[in-house]
Image (spheres, helix red, strand yellow):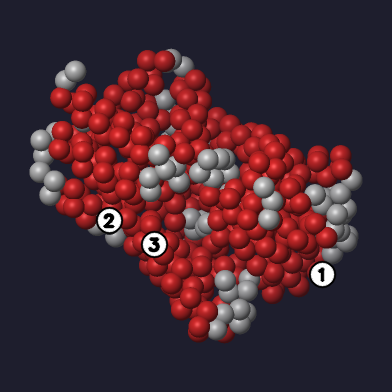
Amino acid sequence: MSGESLSTLILLGSFLLMVFLRFPIAYSVGISTALCLISMGQNLTVLPMQMVKGVWSFSLMAVPFFITMGVLMGTGGISDKLIALANSLVGWMRGGLAMVNIVASYFFGGISGSASADTASLGSILIPMMVDQGYDVDFSTAVTITSSCEGLLVPPSHNMVIYATTAGGVSVGALFMAGYLPGAILAISLMVGSYIISVKRNYPKGERFSIKSFIKQLSISFWALAAILIVVVGVVGGVFTATESAAIAVIYSLIVSVFIYRGLDWKGVWKALENCVDTLAIVLILIAMSGAFGYCLTNLHVPTKAAGLITSVSNNPIVIALLLNLILLFLGMIMDMAPIILIATPILLPVATSIGINPIQFGIMVVLNCGIGLLTPPVGAVLFIGSAVAKRPMEKVVKATLPFYICMLVALLLITFVPQISLILPHVFGYL
């Protein structure tokens, strides 16, 4: 075995071993990188140097701001307003509260950018509300956790910023525009599945649609939805960068949460900022460690070797695209979202582009695959949060979620094999 092959085995083997032993991901990445550097005969000072280089990016400054914006808006009393808006729009359908859950997640995800925040915030309100209306508690939880993944696709999503930085040369604005239609496709797919189940179980429907009620709720929710306009319109229109828009959105979110909706007092603001620091510490240490991990991958030519290995299985683009999705889905079952994006993107993106998948489209594929992974054991952070909020055993929630897994996979396949879903809006706005 050559020295390069041995170092590759040490890097990937030790990393996977520690992941299966349930080491914290940051430790797994850092330790495996250090062992690899030793096997390569390099000085360990390379590790901190590459860690600093990994976070030394102006674009990454948007990540803390977007997370802060999401926490402020998520704890600022907007959940009930977005639920009321969704109810006025789709509550009249059979299984109306399930539809409300899905549409509210689309709205809320565009503000929080976090599936976990969506599940914790909307789930604590909607799951008990659905149960009181006669919906099965496990069905209610399944709808909540699966629809929360819409927020990963609908901008502003800090995970898209991480992908754009890792992929190199991919516009954050283009990714933001690319996420709207895939998010809508996912929502429609989940709504179809919910409707079929609701008709079969004769779940109730709400009051008839009223344009007057919808306009009233829209006016109340305007201040929350305007945060999305600030970010997306500002970035797409070239008024400011993603980082600048995120900083402005934080100030706006603070004003709306404290002075307009009055969902937060200053004590609550400080508590929200403490939560932000906890989240940021995890995200940024992962980005730093993954920078060093990526350095080893590049020096060992792992992306090239992986591309050769995958293409050796088949030269059919459809088969290769399915393999890419399977790899990402498997990684989603054992790792959290950010490390998958940071580690898998440099390896799999060259393979994707070699079969004609646009980097923007691949970014949407990565994010949705990771979102499905958040709902699957053994890692499944959103699955655990949903089970905790509903106070239900995880295995029962998983069983109720099975039909919705199918809906999400249908959306994933559409996004994979119909590139226009992801690329039409970036094309319209001049990114392509």
Indicate which label's residue lies in the foreground, 1 or 2.
Answer: 2
**Counting residues from the N terminus, which is met first, the one under dot 3 or under dot 2?**
2
Counting other residues with Cα less than 10 Å from the Cα at mark 2, is it few (<14), some (14-19), or many (20 or more)? many
> How far is mark 3 from mark 2, CA to CA?
12 Å
Residue at the disc numbered 1:
212
Q: Which mark is residue 236?
A: none
| In the image, farthest residue toward the front | 21
Residue at the disc numbered 2:
55
Relative to 160, is 16 above or below? above
Which element carries disc 3, helix, strand or loop? helix
Q: Amino acid at mark 1?
A: Lys
On the image, the x and y values in percent for residue 141 come to 70, 51
Q: Amino acid at mark 3?
A: Leu
**Counting residues from the N terminus, which is met first, the one under dot 3 or under dot 1?**
1
> How far is mark 3 from mark 1, CA to CA?
42 Å
Which element carries disc 1, helix, strand or loop? helix
Indicate which label's residue lies in the foreground, 3 or 2.
Answer: 3
> How far is mark 1 from mark 2, CA to CA?
49 Å
Counting other residues with Cα less than 10 Å from the Cα at mark 3, is it few (<14), some (14-19), or many (20 or more)? some
Question: What residue do we see at 20% from left, 36% from top?
Answer: 36
Q: Quadrant of residue 214?
A: bottom right
On the image, the x and y values in percent for residue 390 come to 69, 56
Question: What residue do we see at 57% from left, 80% from top?
Answer: 264
**Image quarter hosting the C terminus:** top left
Relative to 325, is 151 above or below? below
Question: What residue do we see at 44% from left, 73% from top?
Answer: 273
Q: Amino acid at mark 2?
A: Val
Q: Is residue 215 visible?
A: yes
Residue at the disc numbered 3:
280
